Image (cartoon, grey):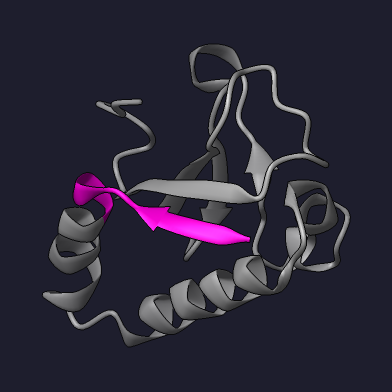
Amino acid sequence: MIIIESKSYRKTETKLLKNKHKVAELEKLNNIKNIIINKENLHELMISEFKYIYDIRKKSGDLKELYSASLNSNIRLLFKPVGEYPYNEIEIIELEFIEINDKHYKGVNI
């Protein structure tokens, strides 16, 4: 798959992880990136064992277009497939990293 990094993602990655020297979270983020890159499509990611290891899940409610992955108990990576909602996970080969959030999803801009 292909990963597109938004401006907001790069900004929050620096602000929340790099500037605060969160080495474990940065390593976990790199692991998640590598796993996503090595998968053929979103469906393959969602049925893999990594879904449970990194707590990758589809959000619900107002954030139903987003997916998230856990970097630690407070920090989550938010991403969405590139394409029209509702998504066909088998056809999705591009993901856009939206942001890294530690405020329990308040102020998320899609």
Residue at left offset 56%, top offset 79%: 31
Q: Position of residue 19 (x, y in %)?
A: 11, 75
Residue at left offset 85%, top offset 63%: 48
Residue 25 falls left or right of residue 10: right
Residue 82 falls left or right of residue 27: right
Q: Is 90 within the magenta?
A: no
Residue situated in front as seen by the camera: 2 or 13: 2
Residue 56 falls left or right of residue 44: left
Q: Position of residue 8 (x, y in %)?
A: 21, 46
In which quadrant is the C terminus drawn? top left
Q: Quadrant of residue 50?
A: bottom right
83 above or below 39?
above
Residue 13 falls left or right of residue 110: left
Residue situated in front as seen by the camera: 17 or 99: 99
Judged from this view, the residue extending furthest toward the top is: 62
Residue numbers of the magenta segment: 1-9
66 above or below 28?
above
87 above or below 52?
above
Q: Quadrant of residue 35?
A: bottom right
75 above or below 67?
below
Could you tell me if residue 67 is visible in this image? yes
| Count of number-bearing discs | 0
Q: Position of residue 63 (x, y in %)?
A: 50, 21
Residue at left offset 37%, top offset 78%: 26
In which quadrant is the N terminus drawn? bottom right
Q: Is 2 within the magenta?
A: yes
